[in-house]
Amino acid sequence: MSAESAIREPLITGGKTLHDVTEDIVSRVEQKPSPLWMVAMAVSLSLLAVGLYAVYLLVWNGIGMWGVNKTVGWAWDITNFVWWVGIGHAGTLISAILLLFRQRWRMSINRAAEAMTIFAVICAAMFPILHTGRPWLAMIWMFPLPNTYGSLWVNFSSPLLWDVFAISTYFSVSLVFWYIGLIPDFATIRDRAKNKISKKIYGVLSFGWVGGARTWAHYETVALILAGLATPLVLSVHTIVSFDFATSVIPGWHTTIFPPYFVSGAIFSGFAMVLTLLLVTRKVYKLEDYITIGHIELMNIVIIITGSIVGVAYITEFFIAWYSGVEAEQYAFMNRAMGPYWWAYASMMTCNVIAPQLFWFKKLRTNLAATFIISIIVNIGMWFERFVIIVTSIHRDFLPSSWAMFYPTKVDVGVYVFTFGFFFTAFFLFAKFFPVINIAEVKSILKVTGDKKQ
Amino acid sequence: MNETKQYWKGIEQLANTPEFQEREAKEFNEYLPIRGGAESDEPSRRDFLKMMGFGVAAVSLAACEAPIRKAIPYVNKPVDVDPGVPNYYASTYTSGSDVASVVVKTREGRPIKIETNSLSPLGAGTTPQMEASVLSLYDEQRLKGPMAAGAEISWDEIDDKITSGLAASKKVALVSHTVSSPSTQATIDGLIARYPNVSHVSYDSVSMHGMLEAYKMATGKRAIPAHDFSKAKTIVSIGADFLGSWPNEGLNQKQFADSRRLSEDKKEMSRLYAFESLLTLTGANADYRTPIRASQEGLYVAYLYNLIAAKMGAPSISVASVKDKVNLEKAAKDLLASKGASIIVAGSNDPDVQDLVIAINDMLGSYGATIDLSTSVNTRQGDDKAMSVMVDDLKSGAVDGVVFYNCNPVYDHPIGEELGKAIGKSKLSVSTSDRMDETTALVNYVTPDHHYLESWNDFEQSTGSYSLSQPTIKNIFNTRQAQDSFLAWAANETNYFDTLQSAWSAMYAGATGFSSFQHFWDKTLQDGVFQASVAESAAVVISVDVNKSASSIAKDFTADNAGYELIIYKKAGVGDGSQANNPWLQEMPDPITKSCWDNYLTISPLDADGKFDYDPEKMNAQMTTLTVDGKSIEVAVLPQPGQAQGTLGLALGYGRTKAGKVADGVGVNAYPLLRNVKGRYDFARFSGVSITESSTGVYPIAQTQTTHTFNGRENVIQETTLGAYKKDSFAGNDKIEISSLSGKKHPYAVTLWKGHEYPNHHWGMSVDMNACNGCGACTVACQSENNVAVVGKQEVLNRREMHWIRIDRYFSHNAEDLTEGQKEASGLRTPEFAAATNPDVTFQPMMCQHCNNAGCETVCPVAATTHSTEGLNMMAYNRCVGTRYCANNCAYKVRRFNWFKYHDNEGFSDNLSQNNDLGKMVLNPDVTVRSRGVMEKCSFCVQRIQTGKLTAKREGRRPVDGEIKTACMSACSAGALVFGDMKDTESAISMQLDIKNEPKMVTAQEPRAYHVLEELRVMPNVWYMRKVRNIDEQKSEA
């Protein structure tokens, strides 16, 4: 797998040697935490603390702490859920699909992207539990567990149940995939560790990896099998999430276009989030030679493609609403664009359809600052997309008598902040204690056969 | 070891007696307090283990602290009380001046639900106040016993003080609302006989003085005759809200609905013309409605008089003409055409206007046909002038004693403030109120009366129609029935029950078919009502001096008043405010404005334009300062479509200061703003009214509905005109079709669903939108039956009211129908805006549709909401985890979520029925109080269905149609809601909807029946019957 054409542009620049790679990545783990990291961690923990208070208020008092009401039963909760799930998609796409397609440039970004997937899915999974009126029961009753309530079973025709399966499968496969990839690198850290405790911990984490040829052969087979397993998940998870809406009767939800539209939206937002995080990591950890402009450009191209698919989907929805002749559907889409939530729709269109088109300019897609800004814009846009789909569809559906507005409360914001707090706390812990780049894989694409220095 | 060494445990062993040896052989040789099994008396190991086991279990159980439950079992079970089985007692509701025959449902001795007494000829459904009155019984704010000068006192002491006070006073006024109880009147008369210095003054919080005076002048009898709207073909109302605020409004609603009931065999209905300033329930149900200023009401009546008189050959009267007379002329034509089957009613409290109305009715031959002069409505007899004189006398000291019998004039009388100041001057002041209200707080002695559900009483609601009241619970507090107080003060030894019975023995003399008085009494008490034969009165000669009336109308009314006019009106929920501390009433959305928990100044959208912008999204209204003859109050302004330009409306019943924690501080008091016209009170003010022309602040008004049009969605609201309906019974059907491979089809012809089998029953409901008048009684009835939580104003603002049944009220208009005046006004904005000057109104009761292919059922992940084999969409609260997916996927938005814990929660202390031990007594034990985090919704009163089925099963028969009624259905005066088994071909619903049962599907063949949102193919079990307006065809076809 490591044959590299002499004339192909190197994926890792700076003429790194194998030792340089180990040094560059493992030293981050071995060094004392930098003050910058401490600050970042403090901020994340305080977000987590504030968020936890909001979660406490919510769980203690009831869903009434949010702004949802008799008409708008879901708002920020499911918006955040879908948003986080979507963000998770990039990690799986990069590590699974790009692995199968032998896109070797993925090797320096897949570790962080997969970590992001895991944390994002955890954040996402909190909402299906927290958004229920009785989370202590929802946590148990949503699963088809044997029970003593007669033969009380879950409802297999409910898309929410499909979600439970989709998310839990996705989480398990992603976690295993990510962890298997980490094992050789943990072994590297273990081998270098001078501190007894570190040696012990990383020794346990590395499952006694010795690096024999057979082990490597098994390792690569497992990676391929897991990639094969994870690949359909990239498509299925968001498809199933989109069924929450697509199988309903609500105009604006009841749409067959949702599965592809949601999947491309997920990849779109996922890549944007990967970019946001990697640009920072790259800078702070000085990994410019591993995560090159080439990587960033390729990811930006994915963003143009998926962003354009999403844009086409938005327009298709309008066309179908007109073409279907369904009065309520037509109203729902006019209401999106011109109703009281027009600003959400406008934000979505600007952020998701217009902003990524700027990447057609090579200058912009190879510019770090522009990429960083647009990646954030895309994530804002994708949040609004879910908000638009969820809230503006149900706030004015069939019976005008029940039309109502949704206004978020502090607790709505707080619970969202909680997931951010969790996400960044987890990500910073990962960045400090785990190898942020797959050392073993990156070593395989080092241009060691050519000239030492370019 | 020394073998000879002996070890012994005790002396016994050393002695080794035979007894010892015998005992030693046993397993338990010590004494054990256990007797052995059957074979031996010996304690065995088995017994020991049993004892041990029990002991351990008992000790460990005793260690657990058992929760203290306050349920006390019957030591001696009363014969007629079975736990879990309700008892029903006929009784009579009374509040303020209102009276109605009711049936009270009690469970384990607690009244929990009020329903109408169908045996009463005046009974027709319930009103919101009647439904809510059962909660007022359990109001913690009620007084716990007699009080003197703010301190508790015994009944004997307070009686001594009051009797000596009565004797010492020069002149004592006994103030009450209208007393329509003959026996109560007798006790009052007895008190007056004992103390001739006592005089009785009665008033009505919502006075009908003008009408009473007019009839007194015209017929010599100061009484309101019974109007029978069911006999009328043409009804003209000039400012009279007979469907909303007249006495016996339930009966009026029923009669009105009866006059408009349509079927394939009867395609005729009455026509209602309304000329009014505010949009009232009556106007909302009118076929032709004309917004007029109150200052023109007299002129409209006079003009109508002239129109009729011209045809009838009577001399005309000279008053100024009116501008907008198209509808009036049309009305006159219809009135004349249906002579003998017409009614004209007016709301003005001006006797001169009412005089003319009597004259018109007389010309049209209404008396003896639609208006019965021999039968009078006895619940409004109050005399404004007598009351004014009393207050003046009290101020001057001519009256130095006052007894308030269940009335609160300091609050609910226009000169209450003056009265309040004068009470202090009197030597004796007594109140029998149930609470420390505005009046009671000012008196020396409080002798709290029983609640009506704790009382014996009788009423003569209208001539010859008697109704008995019996206690359904022992008095909860140390209260005493006011009549017993009167008897005690009159030194009468008998108690009120005996007085009542002896009065009724006189009634027995006139009754036939009873073996003894006891038989008569028992039967009457069981039925609750008694119809005495009314003696045919001699033909009444009606004499009205129309010219005198005309000249004073010409003086008092004007066609061109420019300033603002203020109309004080009564809301359907809180009413006159006597039950204001009842949260069910406070939270009931007003039928017209859909607002609750407040009163507000309604204003024409044309007047509000640009000044008092109302934001329906945040429900933010603007405040203004309303100034009436120098009195200023801050009040929120709510633009109300349909309101006459230049008119302001303010509801009574709010602004209580001492009603209790629910009502205090809610809204503003409108009573002091009533117009005093030489001692009588008028609800309209033509002058002296001003408002600041710009906002003085922002104030939220809680509304349950903020989008007021149905956006032309004919899959929601379907209506037609009588003419079109006569030609084609299907007129107005929006004929939804969907495209399929094999061409266009009805949505129900295409399906992916397997359908449900309904082997036994299939429950359904039909909602006749032609009958529903929007009154809202069903909402409160459902709240009472199903323990629906009250959430308070803030949560209604957050759009989280919990009502299981709501009435959607939509406004609509035909752009072509706009009058010239409206078109002119449309220059302001759009034609739609101009339509707001006089919209058509449609009411649509909306509850769970119990869909056969329900959206909610498929999406619930835990199967908490499922379909029953009887077509019910069921909700298992215990199973619900609260994802709210079902509510989102409900196309009708009828599901309600428990956002918070509404019971036992300080934050929701206004939810009286679930937050204190006394209030909880009103809860229906057959219905779970929902915990927080679960979804709830209309269950078609499944507890009633089960009870009905069980009763039938026990008696070995099928449930009979009509035996099982939902709470909303039995509350509905108009009979708009019909519930029943669609599998029963003889049931009312099957007949009405012409139900066809197919395997796994029912269809209604009745042409007017339709499903809301038919194209979704959720196939509800609730059908709506298209509304038919009795308007000329060209009008709608234009």
Image (cartoon, coloured by chain):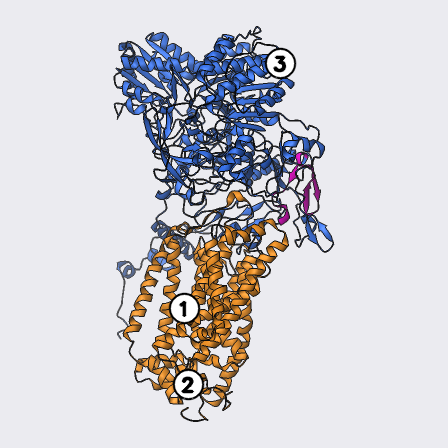
Q: Amino acid at mark 1?
A: Ile
- Disc 1, SS: helix
| A300 on left or right of B262 | left
Residue A211's x, y, as percent?
44, 87
The front one of B41 and A59 is: A59
Quick one: which chain is blue?
A: B
**x then y, percent, for residue B240:** 50, 23
Pointer 2 chain: A
Residue furthest out toward the right: B742
Residue for point 54% across, 42% down = B939
Q: Which mark is residue A13?
A: 2
**Element under disc 2:** loop
In this picture, which residue range is highlighted in magenta? B991-1016
Q: Which of B16/A398 is in front?
A: A398
Residue B301 position within the rendered picture, expressed as x and y whole percent measured from the top left = 52, 18
The colour of chain A is orange
Q: Which residue does the numbered mark 3 point to in the structure image?
A: B311
> What residue is disc 1 on?
A373
Q: Residue at x 34, y 11 (%)?
A: B490
Pinpoint the chain carrying mark 1. Answer: A
